[in-house]
Amino acid sequence: MEVNIRKIASYTEKILKEGNESLHKPLKIATAIAVIKNPYANKPFQHDLKEFIDSHCHVLGELLAKDVVELIGGQVEAYGKGALVGTAGEIEHGSAIIHNLKFGNPMRNIVNGKSLLPSAEKRGATGASIDLAIKHKTDATIRSHHQTFEVRVPDAPLADEIVVMFAAADAGRAHARIGDLQDDKNT
């Protein structure tokens, strides 16, 4: 099964101020996106998605991991992933790609990550947005890096497409100051 990519997209934010207070160092958050054809859209139910997983996960994982790390400038501290499935597909089609080590490991490997990549997946019409959870790359309990990043591609997904993405940040939230998990345990 061939990976049929209609387009690659990206979006980057550089946050300079939060709450009318300048950041000591700008926070960069980015997403790398592939809009792909869903080979199962408008088709009879498929009981086995292994061929899809084997052909798509590694290819998309390698491509998007490289792109998002480049967008951030190589200094990734936090990451996440997502899939937005067009209306003629199943959410499971997106999940088959992103909930697989063949997809996630390229990202973990390139940034020396240890923690699972938080994820979001849903079905949506063309232009729908998806909120990607982002967490620290080595310890998902570091609260300063818990953040959400909204992603939308104006002309995707078409009904027979899947939008697949990685998100990354070069630091935690702007002016994070809520403490960590250990603080809660000590109260």
Image: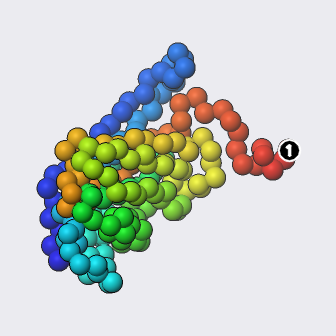
102 or 49, nearer to the observer: 49
Task: Indicate the amino acid at tag 1.
Answer: Thr
Q: Where is residue 139, by image quadrant?
A: bottom right
Q: Is residue 116 above or below residue 27?
A: below
Q: Residue at x 55, y 43 (%)?
A: 145
Q: As rendered, which of 178 and 131 lies closer to the eye?
A: 131
Q: Is residue 154 visible?
A: yes
Indicate whether 110 appears above or below 179.
below
Q: How is the image coloured?
A: rainbow
Residue 148 lies left or right of residue 46; in this view the side is right
| Residue at point 53%, 30% (across, down) | 174
Quarter assignment of residue 108: bottom left
Q: Nearer the viewer, residue 59 or 156?
A: 156
Locate residue 25, reporting x and y percent. 48, 27
Q: Residue at x 53, y 61 (%)?
A: 115
Q: How many marks?
A: 1
Between 45 and 154, the residue placed more toward the observer is 45
Q: Secondary structure at mark 1?
A: loop
**The C terminus is located in which quarter?**
top right
Q: Residues within 10 Å of mark 1 (few under 14, many from 20)?
A: few
In the rendered structure, the answer to whether residue 170 lies left or right of residue 87 reads right
Q: Where's residue 68, x and y in %? A: 32, 49
Query: Is there any visible trace of residue 164 in the rendered image?
Result: no
Q: Which quadrant of the rendered structure holds the N terminus? A: bottom left
The residue lying at 44 percent from left, 23 percent from top is 16
**Disc 1: which residue:** 187
Position of residue 80 measured from the top left corner of the image (x, y, whole percent): 44, 53
Q: Position of residue 41 (x, y in %)?
A: 22, 68
